[in-house]
Amino acid sequence: MAKERRLLGVCGIDCGRCGIRNRADDVIEYFRSQNVDPNKVRCGGCRSERREGLHWSHDCKLLACCTDKKGLEFCAQCPELGPCTLVKEFGESYEYRPKTVALMHEMRGAGVERWLSEKGYV
């Protein structure tokens, strides 16, 4: 069964497996321990409506640049991927994100459609 392409973020994060989107108990408990209202921990995925309360990263700079500014589906399609300061800053901001940046480069190297096919998104 193919994974849903729309659940793959512009950066390569698989929103289908995201603990915030799936409201995983451990994720909800983590945010509760950080004094974040669990009812505010919601997201429909990176391609969902970008509105606070419906999208966890409604103000994502990568999403705004990739889709809004450049009209691309994935950062891997951008000719500026290598030197992109947004991608560099994104990759340095959380411990899992260097893997995500590596996915962008892997996707670019293989070609987006081929990579999506190999990973089961088409």
Image: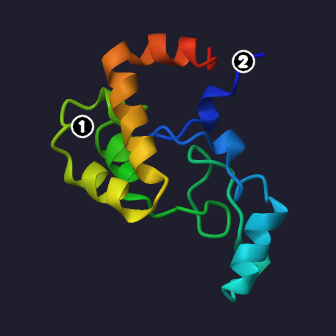
Q: Quadrant of residue 51?
A: bottom right
What amino acid is found at the position of numbered circle 1 in the picture?
Answer: Leu
Task: Please give left or right for residue 24 compared with residue 36 in the image.
Answer: right
Colour scheme: rainbow
Residue appearing at x 45%, y 64% in the figure: 59
- Residue tagged 2: 2
Q: Which mark is residue 116?
A: none
Q: Which residue is outermost to the left?
A: 83
On the rendered image, what quadrant is the N terminus found in? top right
Q: Residue at x 61, y 27 (%)?
A: 5
Horizontal and vertical percent position of residue 6: 61, 33
Mark number, residue 81? 1
Give, as a three-letter code, the residue at label 2: Ala
Q: Reading the chain from its start, which is encountered first: label 1 or label 2? A: 2
Place of residue 105 in the rendered image (x, y in percent of width and height, measured from the top left): 33, 30
| Residue most extreme to the right | 25
With respect to residue 2, does 35 lie above or below?
A: below
Q: Position of residue 44 (x, y in %)?
A: 69, 51
Q: Nearer the viewer, residue 4 or 32?
A: 32
| Left or right: where 2 falls relative to 108 | right
Element on which disc 1 rests:
loop
Q: Quadrant of residue 2?
A: top right
